[in-house]
Amino acid sequence: MEHNTYSDITPEILNLAKLSQDAGYIESELFTKYDVKRGLRDLNGKGVLAGLTHISDVRAKEIVNGEEIPAHGKLFYRGYNVQDLVDGFTKENRFGFEECTYLLLFGKLPNEKELADFQALLGGYRTLPTSFVRDIIMKAPSKDMMNTLARSVLTLYSYDDRADDTSLPNVLRQCLQLISLFPMLSIYGYQAYSHYHDGNSLFIHQPIPELSTAENILHILRPDSNYTPLEAKILDIALVLHMEHGGGNNSSFTTHVVTSSLTDTYSTIAAAIGSLKGPRHGGANIKVVKMFEDMKKEVHDWEDEEQVAEYLKKLLHKEAFDHAGLIYGVGHAIYSKSDPRAVAFKGFVEQLSKEKGLEKEFALYSMVERLAPQIIAEERQMYKGVSINVDFYSGFVYHMLRLPMELYTPIFAIARISGWSAHRLEELANNGKIIRPAYKPIGEDKSYIYLEDR
């Protein structure tokens, strides 16, 4: 069998794929018949309890007269409301990502000395092994930065003399190093791709230990390393809002599953990166930005509610944008009345839009935020309410920060590595069994047929 290129899908593969699809198909009715929670969710979308965690809590309902009813969403890190955390460090004009990372990892808010020592520890770890950028990141740069990030993480295994040691002190050391290195691995990967594939100038800025994670991201990424205080502040808030979201989200659950096998930290985090890369998990904000770019072309008057509403209806009817029938950034598996991350973010997004002179774009986003839930309720049968989620505004923020779209999901990973680390440490601390869910076989027994008789 001849192949023109490595990536060709040949007629033979197409035929085999059809066989594989037919062999893998399971009728939807069987999930109901055998009471199987498809995707580990019940019919109302509620996740099946698969573990216990101290790390975070996602709440979207309240009990009224003995019944569960939808409520405005709340997100807690180690018992602290995220809104209170954001209000606290912003009012004191501090960056919050490092403080909240400490909270997730150690279960308490640091005092002034503990925070300063922790920031110094992270700053000291922002150093890659000698020649790592040249020998690893610059070689075969990928157009997908999440794949580049995963490859870099797996390669760091080779530089660690205690790579397979799963004792808590060693895993904590590995996690702190990865938290510190993720911005460099992501941005250097992008710079290599931008240079070799797009012909842009190559910039490899060294991080500055005294700067926060958010400041270092902008410093490393931008050719002139310049940024405004508001830009760094809002990127820091974005990191805080994305760093953790309960043990049941796909990538954190992946972290628990893979950790339970007692494999190494690098393999575990690479698996979590693979989960987050998926468009159903970490790539949604890219879809939001592209959807709004299409909307701005198709809607001639951004202030005309009827025109905007008509475009949103076309989205639902698969007549606009990517014809998927979705309004991206609207709706969430858990939240119904509001996503607390979007609520906490919106005021800062408005501030940045004013600094950038993009008030008209912000007004369009606000209009869609108001209209989309109404239109979805009219067009679709809903079992719960619907509201915007954090992805609705995060992509707009990254666009205003002039972050390349290739880095949108890696920025998510730069934040979420703190949550993944907390979940890995929690799984190891409890020394539980390997996570092994059951799948019910539904095929029939068959007798072997010798090859000459088939």
Image (cartoon, helix red, strand yellow):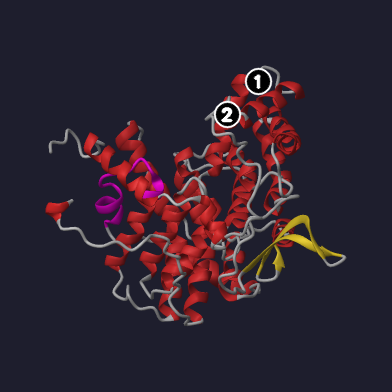
Can residue 206 be seen here? The reply is: no
Q: Give the mark nearest the N terminus, 1 or 2.
A: 1
Which residue is under mark 1? Answer: 299
Front position in the image: 213 or 432: 432
Q: Is residue 133 above or below residue 195?
A: below
Residue drawn at x 51%, y 64% as measured from the top left: 253
Quadrant showing the N terminus: top left
Residue drawn at x 27%, y 53% as measured from the top left: 136
- Mark 1 or mark 2, whichever is nearer to me: 2
What's under tag 2, amino acid-wise? Lys
Q: Determine the secondary structure under disc 1.
A: loop
What's under tag 1, amino acid-wise? Val
Q: What label does residue 318 carry, if any?
A: 2
Q: Determine the secondary structure under disc 2.
A: loop
Residue drawn at x 73%, y 31% as measured from the top left: 363
CA neighbours of label 1 inside 10 A, class few (<14), some (14 to 19), many (20+): some
Question: Residue 143: x percent and y percent?
Answer: 36, 40
Q: Quadrant of residue 18?
A: top left
Question: Residue 375: x percent and y percent?
Answer: 73, 33
Front position in the image: 280 or 44: 44
Question: Residue 215: x percent and y percent?
Answer: 54, 51
Q: Is residue 137 a member of the stretch shown in magenta?
A: yes
Magenta span covers which residues?
Answer: 131-147
Left or right: 189, with 308 as reference point: left
Q: What label does residue 13 carry, if any?
A: none
Q: Is residue 308 above or below residue 162?
A: above
CA neighbours of label 2 inside 10 A, class few (<14), some (14 to 19), many (20+): some
Q: Is residue 376 above or below residue 72?
A: above
Q: Is residue 110 above or below residue 156?
A: below
